[in-house]
Image (cartoon, rainbow, N blue to C red):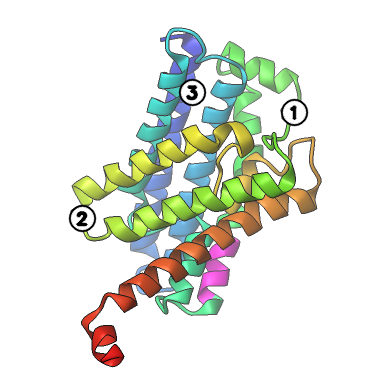
Amino acid sequence: MSADVAVSLAVMTSAVVLSDAARRVSRRLLRGTAMRAYAAEFASAFQLCCCAHELRLLGETGTLRGGGGGAAALALTYAAAVAHALTFRGATGNPVAALEHAYRGGTSGARALLGIAGQLSAAAAARPALQVLWGRGLSDMHARHALDKFRCASAIRAPLPEALCVELACAFAVQSAHAHARLLQEKYRVHVVAAVITSVVCAGGSVTGAVFNPALALSTQFGCSGNSFAEYCLVYWLGPVMGMMASVLIFDRTSDQSSPQFATKRK
């Protein structure tokens, strides 16, 4: 393992540990208040964005190339997905999930919007926080990126309609996996969803980066050159929302039609 990879792994591990500590502290200090959930969403989105920035840096600099670099990148993606699932503890770090929760009546629209505001705030804070950290020259890779003034290029490598469809499909797959894996025990559910996320990243990563999370996209994609703010919103915000809605509408309707009550009504 190279020194660059080791440092990136240390940064990601630190982000997970510190964010989990923040969630635990907020649960105690804000017990019985609505702020408890908002604080958890902020910490979870911040953790997700920090890890995604490190993974993207490893991929863009070619640090994982050679010697099975593609397999190593997918293994890190899978490990990160498992770590997020095990530590989020009810939070999602994803505005799309917050909207889905509100649609199902799990929370009010106002609370969902406040949670999304917290997620987007965390996404906006993660990028400058990592810029300060990378500017300290933790490794040669980080030092080079700091000297390059943290410039990045758009991950959209297809016409906008195709990119929109890719993000829609990614969100649809992940949302559907979450919905169907709820019936499994947690020790199995975590790995099933992580495997789907890794497969989605493998399939759509070369087209859009396979972000399927508006908060994560705000942190990792919106500051890059190559596309306008409106184009990023179309692909990385509208696409995932449409994917979630398609999954909910299709599988909720299928579930209703297969229920005994539906069969009775048809008779």
The CA distance from mark 1 to mark 3 is 18 Å
State whether residue 144 is above or below residue 182: above
Check disc 2 and report its element: helix, strand or loop: loop
Please state which amino acid type lies under the numbered disc 3: Ser
Answer yes or no: is residue 217 visible: yes
The quadrant in which the N terminus is found is top left
Residue occupying the point 61% across, 25% down: 134
Determine crowd level at label 1: few under 14, some 14-19, many 20+ residues with C-alpha closer than 10 A.
Answer: few
Does residue 116 belong to the magenta stretch?
A: yes
Q: Tell me the residue that label 1 is attached to.
A: 151
- N-term-proximal mark, 3 vs 2: 3
Which residues fall within the magenta stretch?
111-117
Callout 3 touching callout 2 (CB < 8 Å) = no
Please state which amino acid type lies under the numbered disc 2: Leu
- N-term-proximal mark, 2 vs 1: 1
Residue occupying the point 75% across, 28% down: 151
- N-term-proximal mark, 1 vs 3: 3
Of discs 3 and 2, which sits in the foreground? 2
The one of 89 and 156 positioned closer to us in this rendering: 156
Residue occupying the point 42% across, 12% down: 68
Of discs 1 and 3, which sits in the foreground? 1
- Is 199 situated left or right of 46 in this image? left
Residue 71 image offset from top left, x and y in percent: 41, 20
Residue 123 image offset from top left, x and y in percent: 60, 48
Please state which amino acid type lies under the numbered disc 1: Arg
Residue 138 image offset from top left, x and y in percent: 56, 18
State the residue lying farthest toward the front. 267
| Main secondary structure found in the magenta portion | helix
Mark linked to residue 184: 2
The CA distance from mark 3 to mark 2 is 32 Å
Q: Tell me the residue that label 3 is attached to.
A: 8
